Image (cartoon, helix red, strand yellow):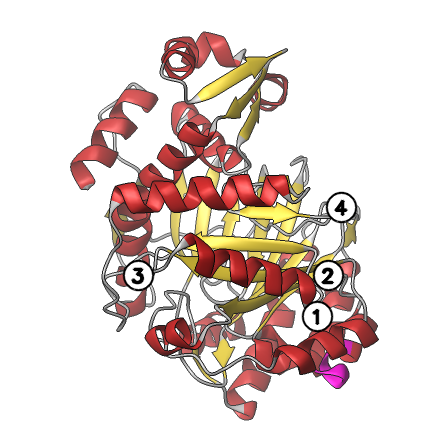
Amino acid sequence: MSIITDLTRMWLTRSVRPFIFRNEYDQVLPYGACEGLGLYVHIPFCARLCGFCPYCKEVYSPERCGRYLDALLREIHMVGRQSAEKKRVTSLYFGGGTPALAADRLGEIVSALEAYFTITQGIGVELHPDNVTVPVLQALREAGVTKLSIGVQSFQKKYQHILGRSAVDRQRMAQALAQVPFETVSMDFIFALPGQTFQDLRSDIDTAFQSGANHVAIYPFIDFSFTSSRVPVMGKREKRALLDQITRYCLGKGCTRDSIWTFSRENASYSSMTRDNFLGFGCSATTLLRDQFKINTFSVDEYCKRIDSGDLPTALTLRFTLRQRMVYYLFWTGYSTKVDSGAFERFFGVPLKRMYGLELRLAKGLGLVTERNGLYEMTLKGAFYYHYYENFYTLAYIDKMWGLLRQEAFPEGMEL
């Protein structure tokens, strides 16, 4: 896997230089000139831990959560005060963990962020199905939340058992969503589980839309090395057939495909990933700026200690070369299934074809993308191979980084 990602990195960056992450942090983050800036807040507490979930999390404790949220608010003020003017941003997303466990304080966090940022495209929150109750939804609405992402994973008992999840009370969830409406209600599912068929996934998708969703996300199962899950990996051909069938089915139902794995109705949207730049707050949150990438410590205790000392909780920092930043931009922009050459040129000041003309011609020749008026769009074949490569990237890069940060709060550094 690392050979494939190493060769790809060297080819696209035109250099043998790896991505070098150092144990350093800046007290000032130069985000003022960044356009298309998003915000992300991580709340790492869950009522119980799922073995398949790779994200930074721990079992909920009211006392630890309260201390953590106090530190989180201080981090927001430390960063926000760095700009003399209020900054327009695209959106705010709360992830976890289970942010709804802190529903009574989300309004406080939103208010702190709104003192420094004007949020133009709404506020999203991730929820466990157990959290979809009228009192919780009302608290989220009062905090300014406009979008929900509910981690259903599967409505079917056989897959709930594999994933270690409890049954979802669909009727209660649908009634709560009908009583407290939101602009976007997204439901997340996992595909490529053992023995999973298109009929299984179609049933989940139909049930989601019948239960109040106007957006669905069907993510592939990825076996991270540091999780306790030992779910068998599905073969490449089966995965491709499933992804193609899911896509054709959703498009045939009148949905819009707004990323590799997400489909929407009624112009609904939910994605914290496709942003040119973003600021991350909280444990494990990442910050992406024009020339650098940062990731915060995964340790709740060390996060709070660093904030208490008046310093930002950055664990590792990558200073991009120009080509590295271009590759990062194209990879995550490609997640939307489209790359706009005009947007690329506005961001970097050089034409996309000048930098990657050969690669674009190859992609078109292989039937991976189509091009019209400078807009490159993935075909079904291209979307699958993006997913296929993304699996290599995740295991070669993200798995290695997150695995290290689980062991060391502030590692000396790493190369990818």
Quadrant assignment, res 223: bottom left
Instruction: Please tell me whether mark 1 or mark 4 is closer to you in this view.
Output: 1
Q: CA distance from mark 4 to mark 2?
A: 10 Å
The residue depicted at 65 percent of the width and 71 percent of the height is 73
Indicate which disc, 3 or 1, sits on the residue closer to the N terminus. Answer: 1
Q: Which residue is mark 3?
A: 195
The residue depicted at 23 percent of the width and 69 percent of the height is 230
The residue range painted magenta reads: 133-137
Q: Amino acid at mark 2?
A: Leu
Q: Amino acid at mark 3?
A: Gly
Are discs 1 and 2 less than 8 Å apart at CB? yes
Are discs 2 and 3 less than 8 Å apart at CB? no
Q: Secondary structure at mark 3?
A: loop
Q: Amino acid at mark 1?
A: Ile
Q: Secondary structure at mark 4?
A: strand
Q: CA distance from mark 2 to mark 3?
A: 45 Å
Q: Which residue is mark 1?
A: 109
Q: Which residue is mark 4?
A: 87
Tell me the number on the disc at residue 113. 2
Q: Secondary structure at mark 2?
A: helix
Q: Main secondary structure of the magenta part?
A: helix
